[in-house]
Amino acid sequence: MSGYFSSQLNTDETEAAARRQCARLGATYGHLIAGIGDGPVLDIGPGRGELLEVLAGLPGSAKRQLWAIDTDREVTEHIMQRYTGVKAVHGDPVDVLQDSDTRFSAIFMLHVLEHLDADYAGRLLTLLRQRLASDGVLVIEVPNSACSFVGNTIYGSDVTHKVPYTSISLKQVCRMAGFEQIEVVGIRPKGGGLLKLLQRALTALLMAVDAAVHRILLPAWRFLHEPTIYAVCRAT
């Protein structure tokens, strides 16, 4: 959707949010990033470029090729201006990757999948599996609709959201794309300060309430209840 960058990602509030996001990404995915191979790394839907910022700051990053693909021209122009060493491509990821024989050590899709139609998402994930190196990893992060606050408030606050995901459906779509080694992990708020402590306490309370409701109403289902979840899919 045109104008997404200017309406959602490039506002007065987002610069401070970007700094916080960089810190969160480093804390969440640092262990994964440290273990990936030396091949190229792809960020699909890079947004403001927070993950690229984290990757570019790692030792030896100058030797690694970083890619970014987005359907929004504003996003790719922003990435090209801010991160000159990144190969930023404007276009449909399926079209771009079908014409490339590059094998990636890691592919990241952070808060992208929920913006895609289910059929297209399946096609894209299948192609991403084919474009991973033999030891490659695909990381997919989404808002968790099994968390009532996310499902009722956050998910509905962006008109470009198309498919809500829980830990169950996130693993399902990855399996449908042919992945066999899939781990789904929940992310909770971290950090110090009074506000963060309050967020952590309220999140823990909310998760406990959601878990109790699901145990009563859906006893055969096993959900994660963190506000944000991510899947780690490994090439086989």
Image (spheres, rainbow, N blue to C red):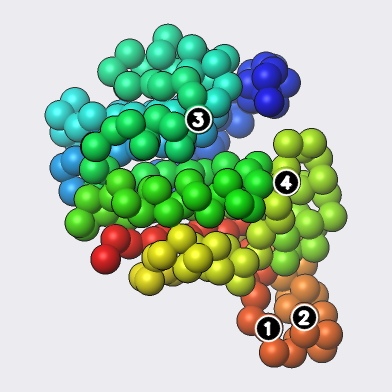
**Disc nearer the start of the sequence (1/2):** 2
Q: CA distance from mark 3 to mark 4?
A: 17 Å
Reply above or below: 168 against 189: below
- Local packing at callout 3 (Cα closer than 10 Å; few below 14, some 14-19, many 20+) is some
Label for residue 144? Answer: none
- The residue that appears at 48% across and 46% down in the rendered structure is 124
- Residue 170 can be seen in this image: yes
Amino acid type of the residue tagged 4 in the rendering: Lys
Amino acid type of the residue tagged 2 in the rendering: His
- The residue that appears at 41% across and 14% down in the rendered structure is 80
Q: CA distance from mark 1 to mark 4?
A: 23 Å
Labels in figure, total: 4
**Disc nearer the start of the sequence (3/4):** 3
- Residue that badge 4 annotates: 162
| Rendered location of residue 10, percent (x, y) | 64, 18
Label for residue 214? Answer: 2
Label for residue 92? Answer: 3
Q: Nearer the viewer, residue 113 or 49?
A: 113
| Rendered location of residue 35, percent (x, y) | 23, 54
Q: Are marks 3 and 4 in contact (CB under 8 Å)?
A: no
Q: CA distance from mark 3 to mark 2?
A: 38 Å
Quadrant location of the C terminus in the rendered image: bottom left
For marks 1 and 2, give the one nearer the viewer: 1
- Residue that badge 1 annotates: 221
- Local packing at callout 2 (Cα closer than 10 Å; few below 14, some 14-19, many 20+) is some
